[in-house]
Amino acid sequence: MGEQDGPGRLRQGQGQEHLATTIEQGRFCVARCTCGWRGPARRARSQARTDAEGHTANL
């Protein structure tokens, strides 16, 4: 399993907390959220973080 980047923003949406993080999987980085959402695999960690921020901002 890959390494985990620090937590993203914590938001409350529809009664569920959202905590987005990034996970490294080989050469790729993926944004994931505690709600079950998962972003696309990215080679750039910064883009995966942007995906995570976009997810929590759109709640």
Image (spheres, rainbow, N blue to C red):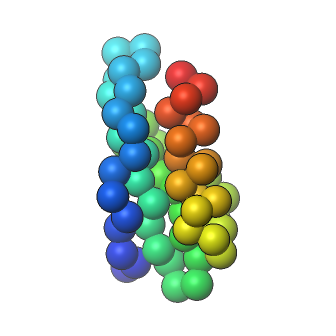
* Quadrant of the frame with the C terminus: top right
Question: On the picture, is 56 further left or further right than 20?
Answer: right
Residue at image x 57%, y 37%? 55
Q: Position of residue 36 (x, y in %)?
A: 46, 43
The outermost residue toward the top is 14
Q: Position of residue 32 (x, y in %)?
A: 47, 52
Q: Is residue 34 above or below residue 24?
A: above
Q: Is residue 23 above or below residue 1?
A: above
Task: Report the label total.
Answer: 0
* Quadrant of the frame with the N terminus: bottom left
Task: Evaluate whether residue 38 shows in this view.
Answer: no
Residue at image x 44%, y 66%? 23
Residue at image x 64%, y 59%? 47
The outermost residue toward the bottom is 26
Q: Position of residue 38 (x, y in %)?
A: 55, 50
Q: Is residue 16 above or below residue 24?
A: above
Task: Evaluate whether residue 5 shows in this view.
Answer: yes
Q: Position of residue 30 (x, y in %)?
A: 54, 63
Residue at image x 37%, y 64%? 5
The outermost residue toward the front is 46
Quarter of the image for residue 13 reads top left
